[in-house]
Amino acid sequence: MSLTRQDVEKIAHLARLSITEQEMPAYVTSLSSIVDFVNELSRVETGSVEPMAHPLDGQRQRLRPDVVSESDQHVKYQRNAPSVHAGLYVVPRVIE
Amino acid sequence: MLHNLSIGELAERLASGQVSSVELTRHYLARIERLNPSLNAIITLTAEHALERAQSADRRLAAGERGRLLGIPLIHKDIFCTDGVRTSCGSRILDNFIAPYDATVVARLKAAGAVMLGKANMDEFAMGSSNETSYYGPVKNPWDPTKVPGGSSGGSAAALAARLAPFCTGTDTGGSIRQPAALTGVTGIKPTYGRVSRYGMVAFASSLDQAGVFARTAADAAAVLEVMAGFDPKDSTSVDAPVPDYPALLNAPLKGLRIGLLREFFDGLEERNAALIREALKVYMSLGADTVEVSLPYLPLSVPTYYVVAPAECSSNLSRFDGVRFGYRCSEPKDLTDLYQRSRGEGFGAEVKRRIMTGTYVLSAGYYDAYYLKAQKVRRLINDDFRAAFEKADLLIGPTTPTPAFAIGAKIDDPVTMYLNDIYTIGANLAGLPGLSTPCGFVDGLPMGLQLIGPHFSEARLLGAAHQFQRATAWHTHAPGGYE
């Protein structure tokens, strides 16, 4: 196994994912097999190769004028929220 | 029967008044009601909306307006936001999500007068190659209900093969249009990255995602892509380039076209699959094309490269699902961290969680250089391989998939085996190239696909090459038994 249970617990915490006790062994196994699989890349000589983040070379990210282009639709958007009060999203108490 | 007519034939009948859009819409809605329960290809039916849109199309037709898609029904993959209609992305976490706006793809098709019948099942967040990771259950392949239809756009592909709509939309991040198109015997095109707007398309891997079309013929796909494609200021990677009139270019002569045979695609390819590709090649030779052998030595690394890049981008994109602003929230969270962790843990399925964790790992301190940066460098090498190949060839040809449709349940417990299904399709996504799959024969009674890959913005060439292949062959006309 290239990943331990502790590794997977740490990753799950970083990703804010609850993983149950029963699920954990399967994730340790499958994530290890994925990491082993992608480790094949380590054998490739890539010395001075420029990393490629975008498939179309030379394309520049556009900027639009900094002007308001949307109207206030918070009522419509908040219809999808699990909990709203007075136009605000409600979450468990953060500050005691 | 109406459902075996092409989009062009349907448009003629709509124009001449032989059939109305409402009649056509009712015909397809009735087929969906009868045939979908055993396929599970469509997860949201929008019958009322469809009939309203069809009436509107009929009014436009009666007023003398004409358009290639005016009054033509379609099914959208449930990854596209549809104003006022549930957009689940195949996930529990979005099971209750009503999109507050239309994706640009949806808006463009709506403006052209196309009529949405419903929304298609898909692998959860488009992560899968079999449509088995959907929260709404697997989709059955109309050719054999014990087999998968491919994925992630499996619902779109199965719906089209079963003649539940004249065309469907899909998205392709690593093969999610071409692979299911091949496994269900239909035509599927993934355009160049940036050709079709990603605005309103739920994001999986932003440097790879691209929207495209499922249709029964390349000519139909050309008519749809012409409407879908084009610059959109709302997508920062949308390319501002004119859209060719694809349907008008379908018969551009193939004489002298240099078809590249990718050596790496034929290494280890099963003989019956290879024989179909050789037969297809003979068709192209008879149409005047030339062949040239090309090699992309880094191409075999495309799957491991993809399974670093795509999960990394997914882990970032899916961080927006927090149980606060929209989507599923766990019950009785004890604090904010618990709310995040359980909403995500309970809302996402196993494969999505696996990919988020893979992405989190390859981006984490101490591993970023070894995995993510390394994969971006190998991505460059693969891209340069394609660039060199296109100096010798005008388009590349090969299989779409290593095998025909496999059994439901056969690969779902072994992620790496599942990932290897996309071995022939992923390269085009990494390099942002357009790719197309067209039916080219059968193995064990199941359809197989021929894949064409071209340089950036060569969609017209791919569609023309596929159209002329389809005029010379009949593979694309076969319908699965019971769906004729």
Image (tube, coloured by chain):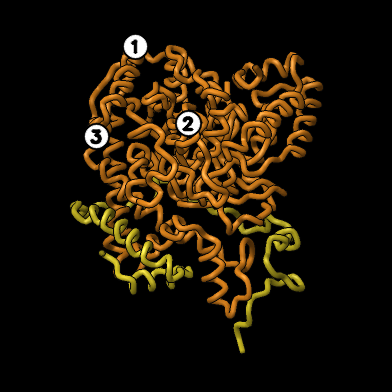
Chain colours: A yellow, B orange
Residue A61 x/y as whole percent: 48, 51
Considering only vertical position in the picture, is B439 above or below B408? Answer: above
- Label 2 sits on what residue type? Asp
Observer-side mark, 3 or 1, equals 3
Residue picked out by circle 3: B264
Name the spot of residue B428 as percent of width and height, x first: 37, 38
Measure how far apart labels 1 and 2 are at the Cα level.
37 Å
Question: Image quarter for residue A39?
Answer: bottom left
How far is the residue under mark 3 from the one under mark 1? 25 Å
Q: Quadrant of the C terminus of chain A?
A: bottom right
Q: Residue at x 35, y 18 (%)?
A: B280
Q: Residue at x 71, y 63 (%)?
A: A78
Of all chains, the one bearing label 3 is B
Residue at left offset 63%, top offset 48%: B81
**Residue closest to the eye, B136 or A59:** B136
Earlier-in-chain disc, 1 versus 2: 2
Is residue B392 visible in the rendered image? The answer is: no
Residues at discs 3 and 1 in contact (Cβ within 8 Å): no
Q: Which mark is residue B144?
A: 2
User: Does any portion of residue B140 appear in the rendered image?
Assistant: yes
Q: Which residue is mark 1?
A: B288
- Depth check, mark 1 against mark 2: the one in front is 2
Q: Earlier in the sequence, mark 3 or mark 1?
A: 3
Which numbered mark, 2 or 3, is in the foreground of this view?
2
